Image (tube, helix red, strand yellow):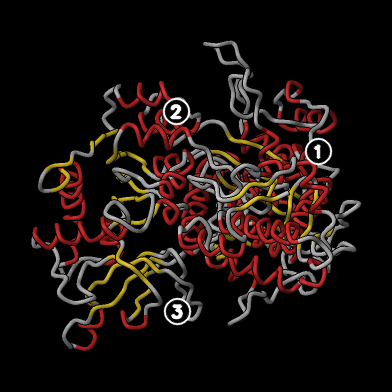
Amino acid sequence: MIQSKQPIKTLLKSWENERLITPLDRHFALELAEFHRQQLDQHSESHNELFLLICALLSHQLSQQHTCLPIAQILLDNPMNEQTAQCKITCSHDELMALLSQFGAIGVPQDSVPQDSLPENSSTPLVLDQGSLYLQRYYQFETQVADKLRHLAEDEIQELPTATQETLNKLFPHNPQKNAATDSPVYDWQKIATATAFTKRLAVITGGPGTGKTTTVTKLLFLMTQEADLTIKLVAPTGKAAARLSESIKASKVRLKAELAPFADTIDMNSLSRVPEEASTLHRLLGVIPNSPQFRHHKDNPLRLDLLVVDEASMVDLPMMHKLLSALPSHARLILLGDQDQLASVEAGAVLADICAGLKADKNQSAKWQMRYSAAYATRLSQLTGNDLSGFISASPGIGDSLCMLMHSHRFKGDAGIGQLATAVNNSDKSRIMEVWQSGYDELHWIEHQKTPTGNAGLEQLLTQSVSHYRAYLEMAKDPQSDPLDIIECYNEFRILCAMRAGEYGVDGINQGVRDALKQAKLISPEHEFYPGRPVIIQSNDYNLGLFNGDIGLILPDSAHQQATGAAPRLMAHFIQADGSILKVLPARLPSHDTCFAMTVHKSQGSEFSKVAMVLPLWPSQAQKQLLTKELVYTAITRAKHQFTCLGSQTVFEQASLQATKRSSGLARRLWQ
């Protein structure tokens, strides 16, 4: 059943030294085997070795952000995927499943788990279900999240008042039903999404950048506030994303007021003021308890709200989604917004991607995604919106009635280079990617890595461009009359995004290179830790200061303090808050932070910049190659509004664009089957 050149316990240490597994993976396997030694002693030594190996593999899966270990995906001849296999499993996958079910530490559920309840085998640390091995806790997360989402998706609001229907039509004027050029149907997906969210307790509105997710939600909230006095909360995973959501809602309300001006006599415009603008983080909404993984709001102390809107849902991991759904009141509605093609959460799981998995179109279809509605709901949506959705009826709709995907980007024109490149990368279309790069789009710039005896000419070119881009805000920072808000907005015009933190082409190396280049250009004087113009990114949450992981600010002289006191100007960290005001913090009081001339692509989620430069490593290691995925490249490209530059090599860019993130999970199956 298992053959190895050395005892598995010895191999675990060797694999740790070779960085094939983490110290946590090794200790998890050893501790679990020791804890259940009594059960293991009933088996042969080979069985015990197998248990150790499987526990290490499961822990390694979790450290790679998978929520489970699919047994069928284990490489029997080389389970640890070594260059030279040190052990192998000598039975088939089916036989391995049968063996694992015999261990007392592994529970095998007989039926589905009722919502918010524990299975009979909850005392076992591991669970084997539907061909995958779970840590008990993640099994609970997955099954209960699936149950809650399915329950929410089943609830439907039966009646839509005539006045509401009329307002819906004014919010979304009638569009032609066919494209004159192609004779293909034209669908108003924003109107369909609004009707979906109005009539369902669960609505998932997805789409790429600029497809109008926030605009749609603003119109939806306006429609809802016409009908009832609701307690509505807006949240996002990070403080930066929450601030961005607040800005977007405010801008959408201004546009909506202008659009509805002709109907002011027939629509209650006062309800627009009841549409909330301020967003908070998920952690703040749930209520952080210092030094505790638990939150103040949970199943027994639910949130006090009627409607919850969660933006950037792709960043929400499985454990956090479980905590959020557990704290949701029984009567509340939930709206999830996000881009299913962006990077998944940093922690385990890919909840939004799993929710949308059932909409993936067949390979022989031209579209990447295909709506799936039940016949009854497709008929109802067609009546409400004037869009004929009969072509999207599915015999097995799953939770499709609660989903709507926005297709048309208003940020990128159909022939814009950034949009074309993002689409090609998202589709992993190698030939199209090269075609876009070679088309000479003004907004796309390629910088090739060029190693020279003294360095890298491509990197030097990027650093020179960075000095040019950052010069404007740094010169503003030297002027005591400059408004800090204007300085920060000028700084946010450009950003360098890296695939990883460490290394010459990671955040650490690029930040150092930019800092040295700016010093040489006499734009900064970084002799001390804090100097005028230094950008900082917060790495941990500080609820007392109101600073959160991912928040970005600038170290600037506090001119207001100087004018008020007449004292010498002191340096303060300046951050733009969700309401648009400036938060000033003494540098010494800042929580964990780093310099931010460059940042990771992960940290950039929820942000957009006028110009973006992405840095890819020259010769990526095997571990780095795993990080370079099409989701990462797509996310970096779509952070740019007007210009995208890439420092890299054609081979690395193509390899990354062809590699999709695959996270092992059973959530999609539980939602769609």
The mark nearer the N terminus, 3 or 1, is 3
Q: Nearer the viewer, residue 232 or 500?
A: 500
The front one of 257 and 441 is 441
Q: Nearer the viewer, residue 8 or 365?
A: 8
The answer to whether residue 515 is left or right of residue 315 is left
Say above or below: 181 vs 174: above
Task: Look at the image and tell me in which quarter the C terminus lies.
Answer: top right
Q: CA distance from mark 3 to mark 2?
A: 42 Å
Instruction: Please give the residue where the numbered disc 3 appears in the rendered image.
Output: 545
Where is mark 1, residue-wise? Answer: 673
Q: Secondary structure at mark 2?
A: helix
In the image, is 575 to the left or to the right of 159?
left
Which sits in the foreground, 84 or 400? Answer: 84
What amino acid is labelled 3 in the image?
A: Leu
Residue at coordinates 26% horizontally, 34% vertically from top-left?
A: 446
The residue tagged 2 is 424
> Which residue: 55% across, 50% down?
86
Percent x, y for residue 344? 55, 49
Q: Which image quadrant is residue 33 in?
A: bottom right
Query: Dot 1, how many residues are within 10 Å of its Cα: few (below 14), some (14-19), or many (20+)?
Result: few
Q: Which amino acid, mark 1?
A: Gln
- Can residue 503 be seen here? yes
For the residues bearing labels 3 and 2, Cβ distance under 8 angstroms: no
Give the Cα distance between marks 2 and 1: 31 Å
Give x and y (percent) for residue 228: 75, 56
Binning the other alpha carbons within 10 Å of mark 3 as few (below 14), some (14 to 19) or many (20 upward) gives few
Mark 3 or mark 2: which comes first in sequence? Answer: 2
- Residue 501's x, y, as percent? 36, 58
